[in-house]
Amino acid sequence: MSQYIFPKDVRELMKAALPAETAIFGQPPELRYTYVPTSHARALHPDSMLVVGIRGAGKSFWWSALQKEDHRKLVAELVPKAGITANTLVSSGFGQSPSPDDYPGKDVLINLIKDFDPRQIWRTVVLMHLIKQKKAKSPFEKKDWKGRVAWLVANPQEVEELVFSADQNLDNRDSYHLILFDALDRTADDWPSMFKLVRGLLQVLLEFRSYKRIRPKAFVRPDHLEDPSIADFADASKVLNQKVELNWPRNELYNLFWHYLANEPERGQQFHKYCLEGFKFAWSNQGRVWIAPEELRNNESIQRDIFHAITGPWMGRGPKRGFPFTWLPNHLGDSRRQVSPRSFLSALRHAASDTAVNLDYRYAIHFESIKRGVQEASKIRVREMQEDYPWVAELMKPLSGINVPCLFAEIDRRWQDELTLVKLQKSIKNEGVKLPPFHLEAGSVGAREDLETLGVFERMWDDRVNLPDVYRVGYGIGRRGGVRRIT
């Protein structure tokens, strides 16, 4: 193990470099902070039309970044095998912000699916962007979205000719046209409507597989593909079996961390210097960004030594408490063991801010501050869950103070004592709840299934219920010997 210890001013570098929570929500960072994990190269490729990832994995990030020419050029330079080039065309087919000239919003979609097959709605969106790029006279001029879809349905041959011609032109130019779809949970407030729209979009992905250069690309969450109705069309498996997941293995989480430190404009050179004097390797400049050497990106032993030179080797006064390099990502994963880079960076930023400047400690970041960083990341993750699925908080509130792992009977008893499911059903009926629990009619067993689908509950081998720390702490649930819950 290396004996080198980073100077404590790396703490200030972390505070300056690592983004605040709001700075990593959907929008791409400054160009120098854009990092492309090796594992994401396949997901970015035009032929990968269905990309799946948990919240915070990078779906909205890439949806936004790919629409920016400078970011596309950077991806082309750094990861040529991603298939993104300077002349790749990109349009937005759906996203979290309203853009009525590019795609219909939620209320418009709800009206459209009353009259049209969702597949035809999304085909209309794709066709409109193809016509825009050609700058040709559009049959959609002076039509609202209902009129556009009606025209497409009534003119199948002309539609086919327009799409074929656009594909030929793109092929002649050796260019792809990506039409990006994201934030599909914002297409509807109820699961049946959203599932219909997702199913229709998957049909469009399948249809355009037969074209050479037109590539609709959908970024979706795992729970959006859970319902069997999603795949009840011919050859659905050809789309679903080729989905690509936006995963962040441990080495890539740390690569992202190094990348932010090395590319900080005012203090980043300090990090280059410390890496050289302590670990004998240098960063290389690629014109617009600093790139880590291959040995750092792929060698977890070196990554561990560098991280421990910042934090110290243990999560306490000795090795029995664990090692920071493995401890941090292990305590930020959901029930599928997937870690959001947003949670990872938020925990590290908070740990740097929390460590007292005058603390009598050899290292820049204290292990207790890392634990409090996990608490902060958990609070953020719980807020995100509240934004996406407000009903989860209603199911978790009666469980505050419980210790996990525990028998499901204990959770069920608390729900019954508080009439939790009865109140939730009443709230859904009277007030409406965004994307309510899909299996609530099955009672507590159904609620458990829904929480497992979201990665909040984990079913253990003996059927007990466990919660990963990234949710457990924020929801005020305990575990003996674990990170303290937030009270």
Image (cartoon, rainbow, N blue to C red):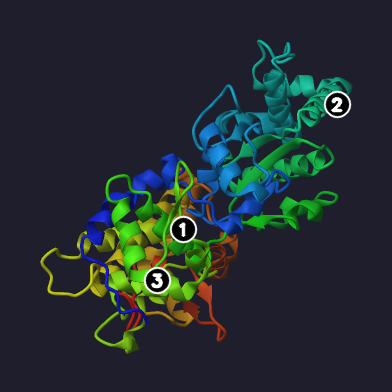
Amino acid, disc 3:
Asp
227 in relation to 140, above or below: below
Q: Earlier in the sequence, mark 2 or mark 3?
A: 2
**Whole-percent x and y of residue 294?**
52, 63
**Does the CB distance between marks 2 and 1 fall below 8 Å?**
no
SS for callout 2: helix
In the rendered structure, find residue 301 and report the number of the disc placed on it.
none
What residue sits right under mark 2 in the picture? 160
Image quarter of the N terminus: bottom left
- Where disc 1 sits, the SS reads loop
In the image, farthest residue toward the left: 358
User: Which quarter of the figure has residue 162?
Assistant: top right
Q: Is residue 412 above or below residue 344?
A: below
The answer to whether 273 is drawn above or below residue 288 in the figure is below
Where does the image place residue 402, in percent across and percent down from the top left? 35, 77
Q: Residues within 10 Å of mark 1 (few under 14, many from 20)?
A: some
Please rate how many residues cluster around mark 3, counting C-alpha atoms within 10 Å: few if below 14, some from 14 to 19, many from 20: many
- Say which residue appears at 42% left-offset and 64% top-offset: 281
Q: Which mark is residue 469?
A: 3
Label 3: element kind: helix
Between the residue at mark 3 and the residue at mark 1, the CA separation in whole angstroms equals: 31 Å
Q: Are marks 2 and 3 in contact (CB under 8 Å)?
A: no
Provide the residue designation for mark 1. 292
Q: Calculate the distance from the C-alpha at mark 2 to the C-alpha at mark 1.
A: 47 Å
List the single residue furthest toward the right: 157
Residue drawn at 65 percent across, 22 percent down: 145
Marks 2 and 3 sit apart, C-alpha to C-alpha, by 52 Å
Mark nearer the viewer, 3 or 1? 1
Mark 2: give few (<14), some (14-19) or many (20+) Cα within 10 Å: few
- Type of amino acid under label 1: Ala
- N-term-proximal mark, 3 vs 1: 1
Circle 2: residue type: Glu
